[in-house]
Amino acid sequence: MSAAFTLSLDAMGGDYAPEIVLKGAALARERYPTAHFLLFGDTAKIKPLLDADPALAACCTIHHTDQVITGDTKPSQAIRQGRQSSMWKAIEAVKNGEAAGVVSAGNTGALMAMSKIIMRMLPGIDRPAICSLFPTRHGETVMLDLGANSQCDARNLVEFAVMGECFARAILGLERPSVGLLNIGSEDVKGTEELRKASQILRSSHLGMEFKGFIEGDDIPMGTVDVAVTDGFTGNVALKTAEGTAKLFSELLKSAIRSSWLAKFGMIFAKPVFSQVMARTDARRYNGALFVGLNGVVVKSHGGTDAVGFANAIGVAVDMIARDLNRKIGEELASIAAEQSEQEQSEPVEAVAGIAPQ
C-alpha cells in the first residue's frame, strides 16, 4: 500500500501489551513505510517504549486512556463501563474518520460488542462474522464464522459465504473462489433445514463464486474449497481442535526427538524439512481475524501472540483497506437480494423457501 494511511491500535489489549503491540507496529512500519499509528493506552507505559525507538515514534501518536478492558471482562460490562477504555477509543477513531481501521489483541467478545455498537453493520447484513485463514494441503482456506454467532439461519450463512468469498479474493488473490458449507455429510439431504436452505440459495445465485455444496470437517485441511462456511459454534470448535492437534503433534515430535541419541542425530539431517513444515503451520503466520460485516475494518489479533504475529494482524487490516473489501461485500449482497426479489415475484413463496406445497 503506497498511499499514506492511519491505523488505530489498542495498545493495552493482549497478554503482553503494550510491549508486543509496539514491537509489532515497528515490524509493520518496515513493511508499510507510509503507515501512521494512533496508539490508545497508558502514556506512562507507552512513551518509554517509543522513546527507545525513534523511527517508530516518528509515525505514532499517543492518545492517553486510563481504562483497560481485561480478558475476563464481560461484553455487557465492557459496553456499560468501558467507554473511556483503550479499546473503545481505538474503535471510535475509525468511526470518526481519524483511522482507516483498528487492530486489537484484547478481549474478543468485548471487541465484537463494542465494534457493533460504534460502527454498526454494513447495509443488508444481519450479523458480523469472525473470518481468518486456515493452512491446508494446497495452501490456505478462508474459514468463517469462528465464534461470533453460535446459532445462524440460512440468511446468515449466505451472508457469510458472500463475505468469505470477497475476503478470499482480496487476501488470496483468487478470481473465482470455491465455497462450501460445513455439514455432517456431503449429500444434499444431510444437515439442518437452515443449511439446506442456504445451499439452495447459493446454488441458484449468479455470483462469481463457485459453490461446491456441502463439505465435511476433513475437507478443510485438505483444501477442498477456498472458503469454508459454518456457524460460529461449529467454527470455533473446529478451530480450537485444529490448534490443539497441531500443538499435540509438535509436543509428540519434540518428545520423540529427545528420546534417544540416534533420534537427535537424525534430526540434524531432518531439521531443514521440519523447519519448512513448522513455518507453514506457524500460528503467527495466520494471526489476524477480520470481523467481516461491520461498517469498518476491525482486526482481532490473538491475545498471546508475539511481535511477528501482531505485525501480521496489522497486515490483514492493511490488505482489507487497500482492497476496499466492504464495498465489494455490499455489491454482492445487493446482487443476491435482487435475485431473490425477482424469484419471489415469479414463484410461490413456498417454492423459494424450499417448502413443499401442502
Image (cartoon, rainbow, N blue to C red):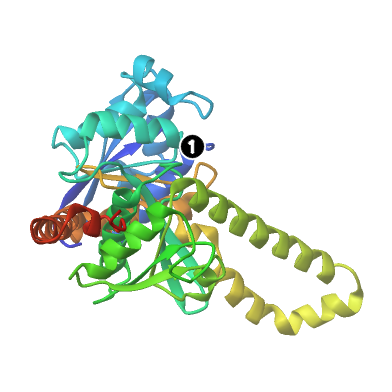
Camera-side residue: 144 or 245? 144
Residue type beneath disc 1: Gly
Q: Left or right: where does residue 107 sit relative to residue 299?
A: right
Q: Which residue is drawn at 33% across and 52% down?
A: 154
Disc 1, SS: loop
Q: Which residue lies furthest to the top in this view?
A: 81
Q: Mark 1 points at which residue?
A: 14
Q: Left or right: where does residue 278 sit relative to residue 57?
A: right
Camera-side residue: 26 or 246? 246
Q: Where is residue 229 in the image (x, y as percent from the top left)?
A: 40, 59
Q: Position of residue 77 (x, y in %)?
A: 42, 18
Q: Left or right: where does residue 290 sit relative to residue 166?
A: right
Q: Residue furthest front?
A: 358
- Does 29 appear above or below 114? below
Residue 13 visible in the picture: no
Q: Position of residue 267 (x, y in %)?
A: 77, 78
Q: Which residue is drawn at 14% across and 32% down?
A: 96
Q: Residue at x 41, y 40 (%)?
A: 52
Q: In which quarter of the image is the N terminus?
A: bottom left
Residue 345 found in image quarter: bottom left
